[in-house]
Image (tube, rainbow, N blue to C red):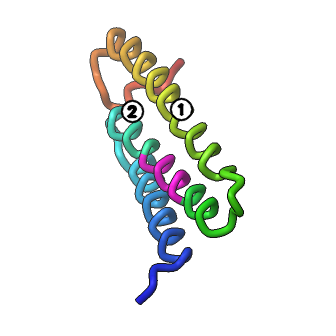
Amino acid sequence: MEITMYHYLSIGLLLFLIGLLGSVIVKNVIKVLISIEIMLLGVNINFITFAAFCDNMKFDGYVISLFYVGLGAVELAVALYLFYLMYQKKESDCIERFNEL
């Protein structure tokens, strides 16, 4: 059995849906951040899949994937800093306690 583009796309979709479900259901801020990173991983798999199967040596998918990795790192750093500031104020990691800005 040959692994085709649709196998990789289904794995990317599955990871994206797991991350989406985790970010909606979970109440812990750290787990929500991890779920968002899983969503970005699913998007990166789809970009690399399209670059490998559809791109003729232009490397657009790989460049966009590297951009998304950098964007995910910056997003995680900013979100962890905001969480640190909110945790100092409320002393809780439950999302329901952070209903105001």
At a point 40% along the width and 22% down the height, the residue shown is 80
State the residue at coordinates (48%, 50%).
39
- Figure quadrant of residue 63: top right
Label located before the other in sequence (1 or 2): 1
What residue sits right under mark 2 in the picture? 96
- Residue span colored magenta: 38-45
**For the N terminus, which image quadrant?**
bottom left
Q: Residue at x 41, y 58 (%)?
A: 18
Position of 60 relative to 31 (above/below): below
Q: Is residue 2 above or below residue 44?
A: below
Query: Quick one: SS at disc 2?
Result: helix
Residue type at mark 1 is Gly
Residue 71 % position (x, y): 56, 32
Q: Which residue is mark 1?
A: 70
Amino acid type, label 2: Glu
Classify residue 42 as left or right of residue 33.
right
Q: Residue at x 63, y 63 (%)?
A: 50
